[in-house]
Structure formats: C-alpha cells, structure tokens
Image: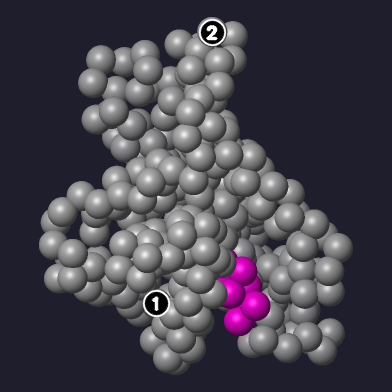
Amino acid sequence: MILDIIVNGLINGSVYALLAIGFSLVMGVARIVNIAHTAFYMTSAYFIYMGFTYLNIPPLLAMLCALPVTVALGLLAYKFFIKPIQEHEAAVLIATIALAMVIQEAFLMVFGGHYLGVPPLVSGYALIFGVKVTWQHLLALGVALAVLIGVRFFLMNTKIGLAIRSTAEDREVANLMGMNVTAVAMWAVAVSIGLAAITGAIVVPLVVLDPHMWMHPLIMMLAIVVLGGLGSIEGSFVGAYIIGFTEALVVFLLPMGSFLKDPVALTIMILVLLIKPEGLFGVVFEEER
C-alpha cells in the first residue's frame, strides 16, 4: 500500500502541477482567473479519442495532432472572448465559467453521457518491490516529469520565458521597460493551454472520458494555487505534490476515500484562505502594493 500511495501521489502531483503551473502563468501575466483551464485539458483528451476512434489514427499520432489544435482553440477563445473584457475581473471570471460550460455541453451533445476511453500506449506491468505498477502509469509519470523540467528550462533560459516571469512579477514595470505585455500575455496563454493539452494527452489512457471530467481537476487545481499562492509558479509546483499525496492518502487509507478527495481538497483550500490567505509562496501583484 505504501508503494501504491507513493506512485499515485507522484503521478497525481505531476499531473496537477502541469495544470496548476499553466493556470498560475495566466493568472500572473494576464491577471485572468481561467476557470475553463481544465476544460481545455478535457478538450485535448476528447480530440485524441476522436482521432483514434473516427480517423483511425494511432494514439500517439492523435496526441501529437490534438495538442496544436487545442492550443489554437484556446488562443481563439482568449482573443475573441476573453481579451475584450480582460480589464473587468468579474466579467472574465463569469466568461471563463461560461466557456467551460459551453465546452462541456458541446461534448455532451456530441458524445452523450457515455463513458469512453483510449487504449494504453504500452501494456504490461513492472514489479517494484513486489507491487505491480503498469508501464502506462510509469510512462505517464516519466512524461509529466520531463514536461515539468522542460517548462522550468523554458521559463528560466529563454527570452520569452524571461519576459513571462518579468511580466508576472510586475506588469507595470515590464511595460515601462518596453516589453509588449499584450504579446507576452498571448504567449503565456499559449503555454498555459499547451500544458493543459499535454496533461490531457498524458492521462487519456488512464482515465474514463466523460463531459464532466474537467470538474475534479478544477477543484484540485484551485486548491493547489490557493495553497501555493495565487500566481506563484513555485507554489503551484509544491502545492501540487502536497495535494497529490494527500489525495493518494485519502483514497487508500480512508473508507470510501475516492468520494472524499474533493471535500478534503476544498477543506484545505478554505483553511489556507482563513489562516494564510497569501499561500505558501504568496505573490503580491503591483495593483495590490
């Protein structure tokens, strides 16, 4: 059981870290609370399913095709749906909720409430200290960790990454220094949606697809960003593994734990808001200084 908790905690934490970091990028750079973020994760998963089932594309190729299509849809939604009202935070929040519901209802109309799935890329299992762990779970963990390393390299060692970090730190100063904050925000949105799409590709062989599959990751992601600190990339990374291991502990150790993981995450979020509202790595935006 201990190894099960460790493996599932690592997988959950890595997947949630990809979602939470993408959410925090847009929150930090564009000041957008994008509730539809996990809906794009679901969109990528459904695109992969459609490519595999209806176009007879191999799952790996379907994943590679789904990523740019999902990012393009995300950028279009940002440009024509979110950007015109970007300065009105309440309107943006409502708009992203509406966008997520539109995506959900679209898939519900097309696929109904049926549970769907994509076969694993690799079959079989490995014996680790006598415990069976499927190769697909190990592959998902390896890819998620590789993407996290790649994201860190991108943010720390590229000009665009530097611009994103600078704008997230202080948007006004970045603008005064000559940075095109509008273009930087567009890059941040593209990276954010790309991370959501990659996450969908990583988990699609491991989960059952249904039009409501975006809601559970949304709850976890919100708990993570509140725990780590709104807009903090480091906080999202650390918070993701805390929530990921907490979820694994709840599922494996508590009776009916699979039904309690969402309430536990929400309880953690509420406690953090009451005790330490800025989170573990709280970020103070320039408009709050």
**SS under mark 1:** helix
Q: Quadrant of residue 141?
A: top right
> Residue lying furthest front in this view?
56
- What is the spatial separation of the Cα atoms under label 2 and label 1, in whole angstroms? 50 Å
| 112 lies above or below 234 | below
Foreground pick, 43 / 38: 43
- Residue 73, image x, y percentages: 44, 80
- Residue 205, image x, y percentages: 41, 46
Foreground pick, 230 / 221: 221
| 102 lies above or below 229 | below
Residue depicted at 15% across the width and 54% down the height: 114
* Residue 130 disc label: 2
Residue stretch in magenta:
185-192
The colouring scheme, among rainbow, by chain, secondary structure or one colour, is one colour
* Residue 120 disc label: none
Residue located beneath label 1 in the image: 92
| CB atoms of marks 2 and 1 within 8 Å | no
- Label tally: 2
**Residue 95 falls left or right of residue 122:** left
| 48 lies above or below 92 | above
Residue depicted at 45% across the width and 11% down the height: 1
Q: Earlier in the sequence, mark 2 or mark 1?
A: 1
Foreground pick, 261 / 14: 14
Q: Which residue type carries mark 1?
A: Val
Q: Which residue type carries mark 2?
A: Gly
- Residue 123, image x, y percentages: 47, 35
Neighbourhood count class around disc 1 (C-alpha, 10 Å): few under 14, some 14–19, many 20 upward: many
- Residue 53, image x, y percentages: 31, 62
Secondary structure mostly seen in magenta is helix
| 275 lies above or below 186 | above
In front: mark 2 or mark 1? Answer: 2
